[in-house]
Image (tube, helix red, strand yellow):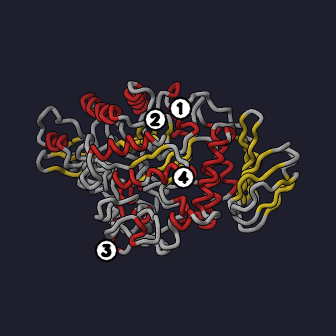
Amino acid sequence: MTNAAAPATSGAWWRAGVIYQIYPRSFQDSGGDGVGDLEGIRRRLDYLVSLGVDAIWISPFYPSPMHDFGYDVSNYCDVDPIFGSLQDFDLLLADAHWRGLKIVLDFVPNHTSIEHEWFEASRQRRDDKSDWYIWRDGASSGGPPNNWRSHFGGPAWSFDPVRGQYYYHAFLPQQPDLNWRNPNVKAAMFDVLRFWLRRGVDGFRVDVISQLMKDEALRDNPVNPHWTPLRPQIEELEQLYSGDQADIHPLIAEMRGVLAEYGDPLLIGEIYLPVERLVAYYGAALSGAHLPFNFQLLETRWEAESLGAMIASYEALLPEGAWPNWVLSNHDRPRVATRVDAQARVATMLLLTLRGTPTLYYGDELGIGHVDIPPPRIRDPWALREPSLPVGRDSVRTPMQWNRSANAGFSTGEPWLPLTPDWSERNVERFEKDPASLLNLTRMLLDYRRAHRSLSLGSWRLVESGSDVLVFERRSGEERTIVALNLGAAPRLRRLDSIGSSFRVAISTYCDRTGETFDQELGLRPDEGVVIEVLG
């Protein structure tokens, strides 16, 4: 059985902490325009404290023409009026800190908006910004400089008639990629980090950090022989040269150095790579990202043997002293309740009991699932560009559901995206009154995690994975916690005599077995997970 090393002794808050991602357009609207804002987040801070999370990661709220809803930034050092003002942000930050909550910002350094003043200067070859973006002449045979494709479909190069050259955009044509090989670009973006660090933020989640450096020769990507038309167009080619280059790691170490000027704020990297390449982003001597985002729970088949093998492999590949992390949902991928249905409670228990820092996505504590978006209300630019995709991202960005009042208490105006069909029953107000709700299960797990070092900082050991059951042990000193998850639709019995002689159930996903004791045989109901204390 796999036996993970004990954690490093660093006292960084994020090791024992839990991060909660907020998509600001969809959390709480304070102005009645149907779009969430910073003041809305501030008004809901007490809810986040009561939930039991330690930090809020806020998706982009910078000025933007909103071609990709904030991931096309036109000014890195301000707030878009849709979301409020810098004063609103400062008030949110102060109120969060007063309540003991950390604030992590979304930093989008790979590309800007086409409307950023830097791009306007670059396309006209002025203000020494001529090569702040990636410009090239077309191929000698005509057309773009190479075969790279956009993540949103189509070529990753667009011709600019003002400059008379092609510019590279890994995403939308309205999102030109910055040239991070230019030291002036690096200096300007590091100053952006300092701007927010001086205001007091506690860290950054860095968007597509693995793509900041591209192959200097811009070689063609090789064809992917496994691609099918049912997959996104970007996967037609293997992304060999358009990202994940070796010289990205010294750059991330420099970024860490900027953060170190202000203590050691958290640096999270968004990296969609196989785990054996992902772990390189911890950097030499852990000089890279504190947490290279681990999306394996989004990618792995939802059954016990596969999950057990994946977790064990990830633990084994981690560099010495590196801290793990886990993600179940985010603003780009289908929600956990959509993917695993009846297993949403089990998935929540898994996320909050694994070794490492978990990230909760807003609304997952309510089990918000897939929402059908009528064609006239589709906002996702990826879905609009690749309509053949079965699911766009709008359905995972729908408004938070607070109560049974109009628009679920999210806004006094029509929400920018629809609510779930069952919003009048699936909301915070109703779930708070139900002791067996997913919301209260999440709170129980977070409370228990905070109170027990075995779960927050302890080691991890795989006990069993197979026949629908995943069992692992968390341990800190003499404190031992067992987590047993039934990932099947039939009851299961398991003997735990290899672990101990007597046990007590601390939490069941059914919320009804707390305090139950047993000797060595554990019964698990369908779709049930339990957290167990080892008594002897």
Q: Could one spot residue 524 in this view of the protein?
A: yes
302 horizontally vs 230: left or right? right
Residue annotated with mark 3:
376
Q: Which quadrant, please, contains the C terminus?
A: top right
Residue at 71% x, 68% y is 489
Residue 442's x, y, as percent? 60, 55
Q: Could one spot residue 147 in this view of the protein?
A: no
Residue at 63% x, 67% y is 342
Residue annotated with mark 2:
266
Q: In the figure, residue 1 lies in which quadrant?
A: top right
CA gap, disc 4 and disc 2: 22 Å
**Which of marks 3 and 4 precedes in the sequence?**
4
CA gap, disc 2 and disc 3: 40 Å
The tag on residue 12 is 1
State if disc 2 and disc 1 touch (CB < 8 Å): yes
Q: Residues within 10 Å of mark 4 (few under 14, many from 20)?
A: some
Query: Amino acid under label 4?
Result: Leu
Residue at 29% x, 44% y is 111
State if disc 1 and disc 4 touch (CB < 8 Å): no
Query: Amino acid under label 2?
Result: Leu
Dot 4 lies on which element?
helix
CA gap, disc 4 and disc 3: 35 Å
CA gap, disc 3 and disc 1: 46 Å
The tag on residue 51 is 4
Judge whether 310 appears above or below 288 on screen: below
Q: In the figure, residue 349 lies in which quadrant?
A: bottom right
Q: Nearer the viewer, mark 2 or mark 3?
A: 2
**Which of marks 1 and 3 precedes in the sequence?**
1
